[in-house]
Image (cartoon, grey):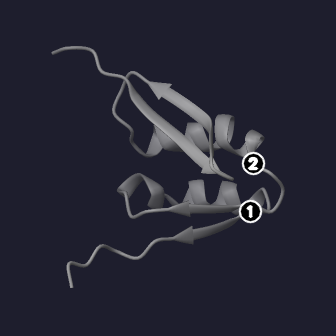
Amino acid sequence: MKNQTHTIGALGNGNLFAVGLFESSINGDIFEVWVEQILLPELSKNSVVVMDNAAFHKREGTKERIENAEHQILCLSSYSPD
């Protein structure tokens, strides 16, 4: 199996920031570490964090960390082919 690097990042005002590179697949644990250690320190006050329906976005502890840092969360609706 060849080595793979997985990336998480954020977009704000047309700029990419809070980029995290990981040698393992992204899961709830990795995403929570990224939110706490990389994303939150770089967010402007009262930001809105938009997330899709990836399973690792739904972890309650991660949502609480974002909200406790006084940011809002906007979850995109589920995909529908209609």
Q: Position of residue 44 (x, y in %)?
A: 80, 51
* Residue farthest to the right, as pictured: 45
Q: Residue at x 63, y 50 (%)?
A: 14
- Number of residues whose C-alpha sits closer than 10 Å to that of mark 2, classed few (under 14), some (14–19) or many (20 or more): some
* Residue farthest to the top, as pictured: 2
Q: Which mark sits nearer the N-terminus, 1 or 2?
A: 2
Check the image and report above or below for 19 versus 56: above
Between disc 1 and disc 2, the foreground one is 2
Q: Secondary structure at mark 1?
A: loop
Q: Position of residue 7 (x, y in %)?
A: 44, 33
Q: Residue at x 62, y 67 (%)?
A: 73
| Disc assigned to residue 71 | 1
Q: Looking at the rendering, in which quadrant would you find the C terminus? A: bottom left
49 to the left or right of 56? right
Q: Looking at the rendering, in which quadrant would you find the N terminus? A: top left
- Number of residues whose C-alpha sits closer than 10 Å to that of mark 1, classed few (under 14), some (14–19) or many (20 or more): some
Q: Nearer the viewer, residue 11 or 35?
A: 11
Q: Nearer the viewer, residue 32 or 82?
A: 82
Check the image and report above or below for 69 versus 10: below
* Residue farthest to the bottom, as pictured: 82
- For residue 46, which quarter of the picture? bottom right
Q: Which residue is mark 2?
A: 43
Name which residue type carries label 2.
Leu
Q: Residue at x 74, y 60 (%)?
A: 47
Q: Residue at x 75, y 41 (%)?
A: 42
Name which residue type carries label 1.
His
Q: CA distance from mark 1 to mark 2?
A: 9 Å
Asked if the residues shown at circle 1 and circle 2 are in contact, with their CB atoms under 8 angstroms apart, the answer is yes
